[in-house]
Image (tube, grey):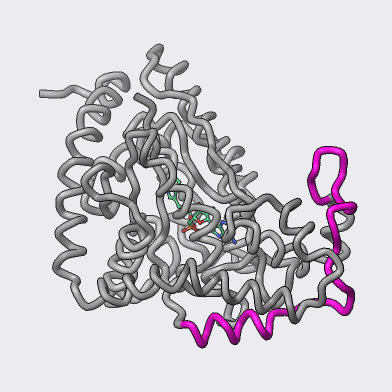
Amino acid sequence: MNRIFSGVQPTGNLHLGNYLGAIRNFVALQDDYDCVYCVVDMHAITQWQEPGELKAHTREVTAAYLAAGIDPKRCIIFNQSQVAAHAELAWIFNCVARLGWLNRMTQFKDKAGKHREAASAGLYVYPNLMAADILLYKATHVPVGEDQKQHLELTRDIAQKFNNDFGVELFPLTEPLIFGAATRVMSLRDGKNKMSKSDPSDASRINMTDDADAIAKKIRRATTDSELLPGPDILDENRRVPEAARAARPEAYNLLGIYAALSEKSVEAVLEEFAGAQFSRFKAALTELALAVLGPIGAEMRRLRDDPGAVDAVLRDGAERARAIAEPVLEEAYRAVGYLRP
Ligand code: TYM
């Protein structure tokens, strides 16, 4: 059976982009695939995390998985640091991946910014750990938002080089699954920037734990422009929003994309519904929709926050099942490399 692997970092402020770009798709895939969903706490510490908060954030991501509808019986849900094989395979991949490959990673450049010399070594080799996450489970498909595409290309390069170097057919060439109307949700304050956990402005994102008042206020205050909403005549021959149109009105198309994703309609259908409307009418409809979708998830996340024992039990059980898959694959990799094993 085809296997899915994906992960979310427990770095706080889980937001609508994480939900629409990733977590909601995780839920949809559990019917057709054998799914492994990880809370990637080892990735999180590539940038400073307060130890007490890291625990809370690890439980928060787990709660988001559960509240969104991932079934912990059918899927494996665990936190990465409970399965040592991730670190072990990552070391081998540190020796397979080339510096030139890592130098091309745009996310490292974005995250390290101007202070490259002060970035942790872990942040630099982060994509190798990500490849280890995926390949330990021989995952065939990885659902992610658009920003992770380059890391998945690197994962394929690592799998291919490992197989070639050691003359084995151990690792599959994993396919990304990037789908839905919101694969790249943008900031509510500035449609040219991605919605992100690390944006200092809380108004830039809708957090999965925001209550109804906060959601309504953030949508009401979201940046827009002074024109009326466009109609479906803007679409190109492939029924997509042309890049030039999006670049001219990034905030409008971002909100329309969010509406389409939340309502599970096509962007075309949403453009038909709101053609020529004022933002005030559209924002009222978007608020109602966001509350209907996110309200119950946020409420369940808040309930699980008060029941850490239940969340920890899910992670413990998941880790045990994850180890049962990962350890034999690590052993195969060790033997291929030529390590002397008992
Ligand atoms: P992370 O924690 O930054 O984000 C988790 C998921 O949310 C998606 N995402 C978005 N999608 C749409 N619009 C946005 N504004 C937005 N922001 C985030 C991300 O694409 C991601 O799917 N490196 C990964 C975690 C990871 C991983 C893995 C993923 C570690 N190992 C193995 C897949 C497979 C990351 O930092 O995600």
Residue 248 image point, x, y percent: 88, 64
Taking the spot 55% from the left edge, 62% from the top edge, the residue there is: 17
- The answer to which quarter of the image holds residue 103 is top right
Position in image of residue 102 (x %, y %): 57, 43
* Quadrant containing the N terminus in the rendered view: top left
Q: Residue at x 25, y 40 (%)?
A: 85
Above or below for 221 versus 307:
below
Question: Is residue 287 rendered magenta in the image?
Answer: no
The quadrant in which residue 108 appears is: bottom right
Report how many numbered discs are placed on residues in the image.
0
315 or 257: which is nearer to us?
257
Q: Quadrant of residue 331?
A: top left
Picture layout, residue 133 above or below residue 299: above
Q: Is residue 10 left or right of residue 198?
A: left
Compared with 257, 217 (above or below) is below
In the image, which residues are magenta?
212-241
Image location (x, y in percent) of residue 122: 43, 55
Identify the residue at the far top of this view: 167
Q: Quarter holding the C terminus?
A: top left
Examine the structure image and report whether residue 224 is included in the region drawn in magenta.
yes
In the foreground, 8 or 335: 8
- In the picture as drawn, the residue positioned furthest to the left comes out as 342
Closest to the observer, 56 or 251? 251
| Lateral position of residue 236 relative to residue 329, left or right | right
Determine the residue positioned at 46% across, 34% down.
141
Residue at the (72%, 58%) spot, across then down: 270
- How far across and down, in percent of the image, does residue 98 sit? 54, 35
